[in-house]
Image: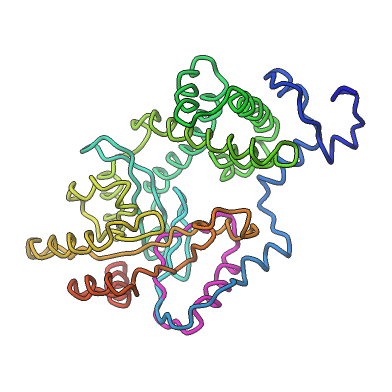
Amino acid sequence: MSSKSQPQENQATTPPIPPDYDLDRAVAEIDSWDQAQYERIVSIELTPEQRARVADPEASYPRQNETLAIHWHPEWIPQELTAQRVAALYPNAGKSLIIPTQHNQILSWNGYSGVEVDCYSSGFNRKVQLLLHFKTEAVSEANVLRSMLEHTFKYRTGQLFEFMDTITLPALAERLDRAAMDTGSSEEVVAFVRFYTARLRRLVEMNLADTPPAMIKNKLLTEYVDAQRGRHTDLMVNRAQLLLKAVKAIVKEHFSLSYFFRASEVIEEVRSLGGGVVIPHPEQFWPILLADYDVDGVEVWNPQSREYTEFLIKALTNQNKSRPSGRRQMLIFMGDDTHMSVKLKQPGQVEPSKYEREVGLQPAWDEVAVRKSLSLAGASRSQVIDEYQARLN
């Protein structure tokens, strides 16, 4: 029996494996199962089970007496659930400074507001990110900054469409060929990825008016491909994800920097509002450390950037010793880079290194070797909280 003649009710539960990966059929044969998968992926409604999973962490850290969290992403998770989770994680924490940093969108928490903004450094012609923090009343009328962020917010939407175009359009086939060669992807894997990318593009077009804007980002494609498990083997989906990761890197490499505001423009606007600026991801953006931007400090550790923590602490210490009198000292920060939507999933459904992240959890503060470097720098989690709060106030 051909796939077209199978009963509709079977398609809704166990869709047939297509005999080929024709792109016209990818668009023409979208059924209720595909629509249901799309709606599930873009939904921001939480089930009772998901709410409980967010609010109740599996671990607790009663020996941690301070909570410093200035680099984390609430996404669409209700703040009251995150607050319950943080309270359970650190039951004995007294002093705290918790500021959310959603990508290109200002959010607030207990009197403080923050955002992680995409921009570019003209000094070395590369996209970078900055963490911006404020007392909430300082951004109540930050019209210029909000306008800049609204423009930059659209970058992730635009990049999703370029991501999909790179996979499906013949004019951009060279990029896909390069990614396939880099990952050793077979013709079947490439065809599989092209098929489901074309199908997702059509689903996005059909549902754009009802899709939350925050969901129109690169992750939508990887999650839609992941939804094909059961319809296709785990091996095929895993190989497809490897190819998608390589394509995404190439798309980011080619995305025009002219789209972004300069880092110096962003910093100037933040300073006019009395806000603070921190450089995250030092291993990814290390040349920015040489640019001498007017920032409050540098993130020397996060789950993606661990290798040079002690080196960066020493480098900042030396910079502080040579800074002219009157210039504020550079503070030493650590960031957990937690994405709260990860907590909606079962542990086995997420890469362990991402699932284990928690708001305010930065183990390096308590590592023996790092503590020695921090001691020589006169820095501690408590000291950073006090100093940064004083600057923002």
Q: Residue at x 44, y 81 (%)?
A: 93
Q: Residue at x 50, y 26 (%)?
A: 180
* Quadrant where the image shows the N terminus: top right
Q: How is the image coloured?
A: rainbow
**302 lies left or right of 2:** left
Residue 92 is inside the magenta segment: yes
The front one of 147 and 240 is 240
Relative to 347, residue 268 above or below: above
Picture coordinates of residue 236 (x, y %)? 64, 35
* Quadrant where the image shows the C terminus: bottom left
Q: Identify the magenta region.
A: 67-95
Quarter holding residue 161? top right
**328 lies left or right of 100:** left
Picture coordinates of residue 177 (x, y %)? 48, 21
Relative to 10, residue 306 above or below: below
Picture coordinates of residue 231 (x, y %)? 75, 37
